[in-house]
Amino acid sequence: MKPQNKFTMRIPSKSANESFARVAVAAFVSQLDPTLEELSDIKTAVSEAVTNSIVHAYKNQIGTVYISTEIYEDRSVKIKIRDTGCGIDNVDKAMEPLFTTVGGERSGLGFSVMQSFMDYLRVSSKPKKGTTVIMKKKLSLKVATNG
Amino acid sequence: MSLNIIHSGQVITACLDGEIDHHTAAGIRNQIDQAVVENHPTMLVLDFKNVSFMDSSGIGLVMGRYKVISAEGGELAIVNTSPQIGKVMKLAGMDRLAKIGTEEILNETAK
């Protein structure tokens, strides 16, 4: 199935861009007229994935985060967030709730949020090559309104 | 992201304003901790009324403040969360660490 519309962007892995990334994706998805809850879910999941690239993949450096969003006729949304950072040794371990490799106040819940707020999550990663996160969500059918 | 700290008897309320993510969380953490350590409140209230967005960085912020107030022998309360923020809090099991609700829970505690 071909997407009916597609949007790509790349941003430097600066933490100030976390807000921009989630708002940009949400603005693009808005053309499908999602519910507020669906839009919040997408914004939260994007924020988690982009933050992972910034905090983990490009830990002590500025790299590029690639984000693409596709929307389909059946009201599904596919979001791909990719970096070419340090990669993840053990993806299954990284996806366990509360697991985190950095100190400070990282909750270790990023992947749990993505999993729970989206319908589909796939994480592929190669050490020293980078990580790609693919998330999908099918939006609810629009309720017909009069007028 | 901005922060307003209100002292009322033994209760300190931190009114958060804006969006909480990894970028903004760091800036407010120290201000809240300083108020707690200096005043030894019996309760720290995190008021989310004016928070329009929060991701799991906010959970890190809540868990960190829970540790600080617990070390001081006090309790943590979380009030006025939007449905989106409530969903993230619930996923993280924050209801096991803190009282979550509206401002009324504070009145009940004061009784």
Image (cartoon, rainbow, N blue to C red):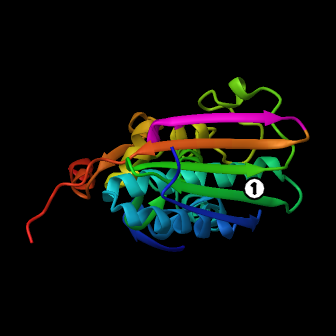
Residue A62 included in the magenta stretch of the image:
no
User: What residue would you read off at disc 1?
Assistant: A54
Residue A103 falls in image quadrant: top right
Q: Secondary structure at mark 1?
A: helix
Q: Amino acid at mark 1?
A: Ile
Query: x and y percent of residue A72 in the render?
Result: 45, 51
Where is residue B30 shown, x and y percent of the image? Answer: 65, 63
Residue visible at 44% across and 37% down in the picture: B91
**Residue B28, placed above or below residue A83:** below
Look at the picture and state if A117 lies above or below A24: above
Q: Which residues are magenta?
A: A115-127
Left or right of B86? Residue B39 is right
Q: Residue at x 25, y 50 (%)?
A: B105
Q: Nearer the viewer, residue B77 or B19?
A: B19
Question: Where is the N terminus of chain B found, in terms of image quarters?
Answer: bottom right
Q: Position of residue B74 (x, y in %)?
A: 46, 46
Q: Nearer the viewer, residue B95 or A123?
A: A123
Residue lying at 63% horizontally and 27% vertically, measured from the top left: A96
Front in this rendered view, residue B77 or A96: A96
Spot occupied by residue B34 in the image (x, y as percentages of width and height): 62, 64
